[in-house]
Amino acid sequence: MRKHIPKIALLGLILESNRFARSASLDDFERLTVKRGKILIDDARSTTPSIAIEFSAFVKAMDATGDWQPVPIILMASRPLGALQKAVFEGYCAEAISQLDESFDAVYLCHHGAMVAEHLHDPDGAIAEMTRLAVGPKTPIIMTLDLHANISDKMCHSVDLICGYRTNPHVDQNDRGQEAAFGLRQILHGLAVPKIAHVKLPLAPSSITLLTANGPLGRAIDFGQRRLAEFGSKILNISIFGNFIFSDVPENGVSIVVTARDDAAIATSLANEIATFIWDSRDDYVKSLTPFKKAIEIALNKGREPVIFADSGDNPGGGGSGRTTGLLSALLASDAQNILYGSFFDPALSQDAHAKGIGESFTAVFNQDRNDIPREAWDERLGVEAKVIGLHDGEIVGRLGMMAGRKLSLGLCALLEIAGVKVVVISERAQTADPVFFEMFDQDIAAAHTIIVKSRGHFRAGFAPWFEGSNIYEIDTVGLTSPVLSRWDFKNVPQPSFPFQTKAEWNRPR
Ligand SMILES: [Zn+2]
């Protein structure tokens, strides 16, 4: 008898939606990832993929574990923005879901899990449900998700295995893609008939409390992994999702998703146990930032060790514009010295610098209207005398942390010297989570007195060789990702939820 080679559909739609940012259009996806067919599978198999690392890892792990017939339908990814435009959602479904049918042996869905559409709170769940309807009740569906996903019961009821990132900064995307493939192989071999349990807590923390090297979420994930080891092969996966508060959806809240090999009761009891562990530590999911004025004082202190500042309010990795200039203005007014600041998303300014050339001085104007990019309230215009000290085409490969090994296309880039501050300007909106943003201009991280990054948390993995705990400051700056939750008018986050209502209750399972 001829061996059956499993035919597996590969598809995904990746967007982290910040409800307060502008909507995501097809153009926003085309600027990062819209790949189909051979181009998609070739990118996945390359040594420096440009696409989501877990997708690439899934493909490579499937290649390494036996025969299969991949059907690379489509992968679309945008950098974090606002709600997905309705037409983009409908176009994706019309193209991708319509290619699915009962002839497939399995489906891999590569999603972030915190997407909002203009007309839907839970498009990730809607796609999972449509996928289930298209392929029938028996076909395994595997889904990978970001740690910041907002999990719905619809997702959990529609798929067979969910693998969420377990690190923040997200440095385990490769491992999770592999884990998804290994899990699928087991299911295909009849070694698992997965049962998923999902528990959501009325706990909706801000992203700054969700780091995993230390802090409450890290402890919860460690606890889950210890329990998983104790249960042995009875459990396929434990994923704990911290939620993405800026999505402002009814699905906000920490979720515990346990996938058992075949026993639903074990999955439920373990999910409840982990939920209880997290609920009992809810007071730890509150954290304060370094006040703006204090940051300037620290920058001016010549006697201290080098430090790194996170421009927390303007993290492009959470939907921030990458264009706020308040902190830069204050530093320039203070005469602080030896600062490296990256990266400002400003294509027009980068073009101006390229037109001038290295060594030339000019009046640099941040946030000109020429960009044709909508300006948020905080994206103030700033005109300053600057010298061009570096130019780059922006084609780089991530070196450390979450972006390591991934091909990044940042468009035309420039390094400007403005008094005591060297400023990186980029032409694609990206968070500065990797030292390569400075190193592409031959800047030495170790030689700077103060590094400032437009990133909220992911920079910690990229800059770990130079900075740890006490040398890292999260600055209270304004912008679309300000973690001070009281500044935002949330409309859909479940009420009551901790820490919005400190008296929020959770009915503990007996
Ligand atoms: Zn994330």
Image: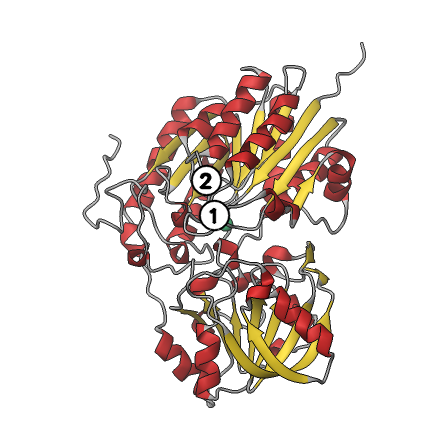
Rendered image quadrant of residue 1 = top right
Q: Could you say which is closer to the camera, residue 212 or residue 69?
A: 69
Q: For this rendering, which residue is in front, 168 or 19?
A: 19
Distance in Å between CA atoms under marks 1 and 2: 8 Å
- Residue extending furthest right? 2
Q: Position of residue 497 (x, y in %)?
A: 27, 44
In percent of the image, x 59 and y 56: which residue is there?
A: 402
What amino acid is labelled 2 in the image? Val
**Residue located 46% across and 81% down the image:** 331
- Mark 2 neighbour density, 10 Å: few (under 14) some (14–19) many (20 or more): many
In this rendering, is residue 13 above or below 357? above
Rendered view: 373 above or below 121: below
Residue corresponding to mark 2: 116
Percent coordinates x, y for residue 277 in the rendering? 32, 44
- Whether the residues at callouts 1 and 2 have beta carbons within 8 Å, the answer is yes
Q: Is residue 233 visible?
A: no
Which residue position is annotated with label 1?
82
Question: Which secondary structure, mark 2?
Answer: loop
Label 1 vs 2, first from the N-terminus: 1
Residue 219 x, y percent position in the rendering: 40, 51
Residue shown at 74% from the left, 65% from the top: 393
